[in-house]
């Protein structure tokens, strides 16, 4: 069997990039291997999706979605079986004013029926355009509005995959490279504490100041 890693690709001012990376588990194996044209069609459809208005507000107008990448990987050893990268015709910018640093994100926790760390996952959505209160937390209404948006967005990704591969169903899942299992998600959960999307740090362009010491 195999699984599909979806990467929503985004850009920030200065040329740095970010990504959001859910995993989907096919209910059946790809018949006769992964059809590249179907994979390209699924990737193009996912790249063209528009998240809900709350998700765009969280991004702020400083961030934009530029495309998507799909990786089909072997369920046993995580080897790459197929890949497609598609760029949007025009980048989709978020809305609102940038209020937080480039790495600020809201965590969407993924829960399954599998106990332990191998049954839990998380994805990070940029939270650059959202203020915090005096308690240094997002308001519960902000968190719940993003949760509703992300449920619709993730289901739209499932739909794009199912349309491109009509004989296969897909489930949102958590991938454990330790146990080589892909349990299915049965609950999404969002807190109200800002987090840091460390993966976005890989390509952040930064100016440094230095001084001699002592």
Image: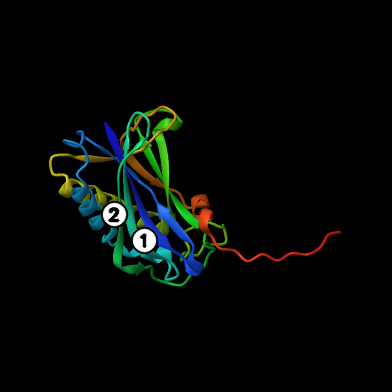
Per the model, the C-alpha gap separating discs 1 and 2 is 9 Å
Picture residue at 54% right of the left edge, 63% below the top: 101
Residue at mark 1: 55
Give 176 or 121, whichever is nearer the viewer: 176
Q: Please give the residue where the numbered disc 2 appears in the rendered image.
A: 153
Q: Is residue 127 rendered to the left or right of residue 77?
A: right
Give the quadrant of residue 189.
top left
Q: Residues within 10 Å of mark 2 (few under 14, many from 20)?
A: some
Residue found at the far left of this picture: 167
Q: Mark 1 Cα within 10 Å, few/some/many (few <14, many 20+)?
A: many
Q: Is the residue 68 above or below the residue 121 in the image?
A: below
Closer-to-camera residue (42/185): 42
Q: Secondary structure at mark 2?
A: helix
Q: Is residue 211 visible?
A: yes
| Count of numbered labels shown in the rendering | 2
Q: Secondary structure at mark 1?
A: helix
Q: In the rendering, which numbered label is found on residue 184? A: none
User: Percent x, y for residue 125?
Assistant: 42, 55
- The residue sitting at 34% across, 33% down in the picture is 182
**Which is nearer the N-term, disc 1 or disc 2?**
1
Inspect this view and state whether residue 194 appears: no
Residue 22 in the image, given as x and y percentages of width and height: 35, 46
As drawn, the residue found furthest toward the right would be: 214
Q: Quadrant of the C terminus?
A: bottom right
Quadrant in the picture for the N terminus = top left
Q: Are marks 1 and 2 in contact (CB under 8 Å)?
A: yes
| Residue 159 sits above or below residue 205 on the image | above
Q: Is residue 37 above or below residue 169?
A: below
Relative image position of residue 96 (x, y in whole percent): 42, 72
Q: Is residue 210 left or right of residue 131?
A: right
Relative image position of residue 105 (x, y in whole percent): 48, 55
């Amino acid at each position: 069997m195999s699984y599909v890693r979806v990467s929503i690709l985004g850009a920030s001012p200065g040329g740095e990039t970010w990504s959001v990376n859910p995993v989907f588990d096919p209910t059946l194996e790809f018949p006769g291997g992964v059809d590249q044209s179907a994979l390209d069609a699924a990737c193009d459809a996912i790249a063209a999706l528009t998240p809900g208005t709350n998700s765009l507000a969280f991004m702020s107008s400083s961030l934009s979605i530029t495309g998507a990448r799909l990786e089909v990987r072997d369920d046993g050893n995580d080897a790459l079986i197929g890949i497609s990268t598609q760029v949007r015709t025009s980048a989709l910018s978020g809305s609102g004013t940038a209020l937080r640093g480039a790495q600020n994100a809201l965590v969407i926790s993924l829960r399954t029926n599998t106990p332990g760390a191998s049954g839990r996952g998380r994805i990070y959505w940029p939270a650059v355009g959202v203020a915090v209160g005096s308690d240094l937390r997002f308001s519960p209404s902000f968190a719940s509005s993003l949760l509703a948006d992300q449920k619709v967005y993730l289901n739209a990704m499932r739909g794009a995959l199912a349309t491109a591969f009509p004989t296969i169903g897909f489930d949102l899942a958590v991938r454990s490279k330790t146990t080589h299992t892909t349990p299915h998600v049965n609950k999404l959960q969002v807190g109200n504490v800002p987090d840091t999307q460390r993966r976005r740090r890989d390509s952040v362009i930064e100016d440094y100041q230095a001084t001699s010491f002592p």
